Amino acid sequence: MTEERFYMPVKVISGREAVRKHASGLKGFGKKALIVTGRRSAKACGVYDDICAALEEAGIGHAWFHEVEENPSVTTVMEARDLGLREQADFVIGAGGGSAMDAAKAVALMIRHAEEDRAYLYQPGTDSSTVPVVCIPTTCGTGSEVTAVSVLTNDAKGVKGSIPHKIFPALSLIDGKYLRFAGRKVLCNTAFDALSHLYESFLNADATPLSRMIAESGMKEWSRCLCVLKGEKEAEDGDYAAMMRAAMLGGMAIAHTGTSLPHALSYALTCRLNVPHGNAVCYFMAGYLSEADPEEVSHILKLSGFSGVSDFSRTYLACCGGPEASEEELLSALEQSCREVIPNPSKRAKAPFAVSDELLRRIAFSGTASGKWRAVLFDLDGTINDSGPGIMNSVRYALKKMGYPAPEDAVLRKFVGPSLMYSFQTYCQMSEEEARQAVDAYRECYLAGECYNLRVYPGILKLLSDLKQAGIRCAVVTSKPQQTTERILAHMDILRLFDTVAGPDPDDPSNRKSVLIERALRDLELTAADVIMVGDSRYDIIGAKEAGCASAGVLYGYGSLEELRENGADHIVADPQALRSILLQ
């Protein structure tokens, strides 16, 4: 049996008026407290007044440092340490969000080691003893009140990360009433931070049955508050208490497993783009979930109130908004994220799956699409399968029967995708009547067996299966006749993966891609804003624009980069793996 350990030395008291009711619990920590908070929220939410009242009742003096910024810097920690030393504080109370509590832990370390300079914060293997620390959370995200982690920004190097010292608080007092004073944006960003802890601890190489039990309990608590985060109801005391419990349980879970890739990738977004921590972490979460075991992902999404990965992505974006940055700034920050994580094996080690450089980049860039697709519309030829050999052979047969010379393969390749009538008239200069005859001859050959002379592009089958698992519906929208398309999909055993097929009737000249897209939308009962059209040619991109939906052009088919760009494809990808990052959020 694998050895399992559980260590949680923090005494936690949670409930209404926890700070004032348990003033006597502060007496054993010292004679004077250094209260460490942010610049405004401690007064606004009332926690500072509650602490002062509790300290006065316990006969304990205090000094107040209220300059902790979001993403606390080493410089700030040292300024607070110096104040604590001047005031002869012998314990520290950190009150606020994760920044204040993380800073308080580091301050307590440096007060205990008064002779050391700031470099001591980053010296592994040294004495990590501190003066006592009390934590009082006023947001529902970090879980720092029950973890040994202190995340600081080394402002001398411009790097954010955990210091090597493990510092558990001695006591944590938790009261949901402080969340009443948090704005909606803060509430959403911190709640999604808590959810990221729950997910990353569950999907973790170091997860144990016990840590997973804690995470599952946290997800159930978190799901109770989802309607509040969505703005569907006003929060009540029970909702705030559940948010605090979810955050605490998330902290307990990561105290045993640590966090994984979404956290590792998030720091560049926070440091360079000032994206709030929970928002930055969850930006990468859909990509992380898409790489993990589908059954486990389905389980935790259901526990926390989501129908699939796409539902999670839409909700995250609706609640947190995603990074507010230009595309150039965002892509630059994502590249930095990859540069920081790719050469660091320890940051990959927590993932419960093998992490190649390619996979890591796929997760990092998974959020560059909108993340709102309820369905994906796929072109067939050149997108799902390489049907070129069968189509080109059938064109050669038709041209020979019509007495036309066969053009070069470069011209024959152009027949893959567009309607046959258009192609025979455009590339062979046939009259409309001749083109009809050529189409009939083509079908003689094609339906006799050349329609099965094809191969599914590598990676497409898994992508389709994963889309289905994620709750994203799929459709085929193609210029190939409906009945023929369904026969081909059934032959490849993938017809079951599509919710509808939209192809023209052989006798119906209305085969514009936009008309077919609109038919698929009616079948799916969706709007153009809900879907993205994926194809390899200009006709797919033009059709998407005419229908009013987004588009993704693929370069592995029969179209060209130039035609996809010229016709305004919203996304252009090189292969099915890159397509995954656009479709699976």
Image: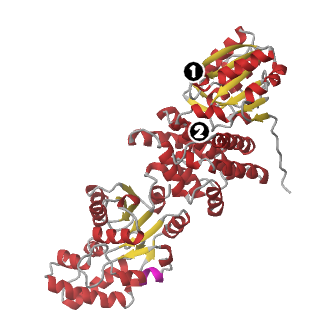
Residue 527, percent from left and from top: 37, 62
**Residue type pointed to by label 1:** Arg
Residue 360, percent from left and from top: 55, 50
The disc, 2 or 1, on the residue closer to the chain's N-terminal end is 1
| Residue at the (25%, 79%) spot, across then down | 420
| Residue at the (75%, 52%) spot, across then down | 213
Numbered circles on residues, count: 2
Q: Would you name the residue on which mark 1 appears?
A: 39
Q: Which residues are magenta?
A: 487-491
Q: CA distance from mark 2 to mark 1?
A: 18 Å
Whether residue 343 is visible, yes or no, is: no
Label disc, if present, on residue 141 of the rendered structure: none
Secondary structure of residue under mark 2: helix
Label disc, if present, on residue 190 of the rendered structure: 2
Secondary structure of residue under mark 1: loop
Residue 297, percent from left and from top: 62, 58
> Is the N terminus in the top left, top right, bottom left or bottom right quadrant?
bottom right
Q: Is residue 5 left or right of residue 561?
A: right
Crowd class of label 2 (few under 14; some 14 to 19; many from 20; radius 10 Å): many
Residue 256, percent from left and from top: 75, 43
As drawn, the residue found furthest toward the top would be 86
Crowd class of label 1 (few under 14; some 14 to 19; many from 20; radius 10 Å): some
| Residue at the (33%, 68%) spot, across then down | 517
Whether residue 123 is visible, yes or no, is: yes
Does residue 295 lie above or below 240 as drawn? Answer: below
